[in-house]
Image (spheres, rainbow, N blue to C red):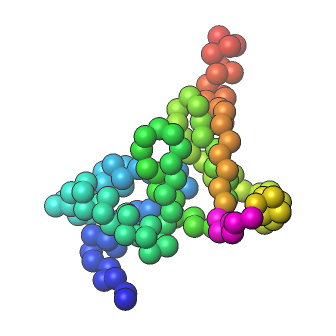
Amino acid sequence: MATKFSRQRQAIWDFIKDRTDHPTAEAVYLGVKSACPNISLGTVYRNLMLMRDTGMIRTVEVGDGVIHFDPNTTDHNHFICTNCGKVIDIDGGDVEAIKQEAAAHFTGRIQGYSAYFYGLCPDCTKSAATKTTE
């Protein structure tokens, strides 16, 4: 059954579809509020979860207690900055090889894959370097 794309859902999709910064529901809400002044945070959240459930987007939980949303639904890795909390996609690496290696040591069926790397993002690395030279 196809889900009707309301004006609000379209605004949410337009806001998130090309993003790589993994916004939270609150960030999406603030981003679409000008296009849809009567939209509520609850409506944004419900629509994001519906988009997740239909495979349009994926959720990313990075341990900060907040759900982040990612329009890139392919298997890929994420980097989480331990200083500012940014969530960044890491491209590259042979994801299929990693899945095959894991499957060789697992009797169930692996259907997806995501890995998290932690450290300082480029902005925080630059900021830390600037502070040490001052």
Q: Is residue 14 visible?
A: no
Q: Where is 42 relative to 65, above or below?
A: below
Q: Is residue 24 visible?
A: yes
Image coordinates of residue 7 in percent, x first then y, are: 27, 75
Q: Is residue 111 magenta?
A: yes
Residue furthest out toward the front: 107
Tell whether 132 sits left or right of 53. right
Residue beneath the point at 42% across and 44% down: 66
Residue in front for this viewpoint, 74 or 20: 74
- The region drawn magenta spans 107-112
Image coordinates of residue 64 in percent, x first then y, are: 47, 38
Count of picture labels: 0
Residue in front for this viewpoint, 115 or 27: 115
Predominant SS of the magenta segment: loop
Image coordinates of residue 16 in percent, x first then y, are: 44, 62
Q: Is residue 65 magenta?
A: no
Tell whether 62 sits left or right of 43. right
Residue furthest out toward the left: 38
Residue beneath the point at 48% across and 72% down: 56
Residue beneath the point at 43% across and 50% down: 67
Which quarter of the figure is the C terminus placed in?
A: top right
Which quarter of the figure is the N terminus placed in?
A: bottom left
Residue furthest out toward the top: 134
Image coordinates of residue 126 in percent, x first then y, are: 66, 28
Residue beneath the point at 32% across and 71% down: 9
Q: Where is 133 relative to 3, above or below?
A: above
Residue in front for this viewpoint, 16 or 59: 59
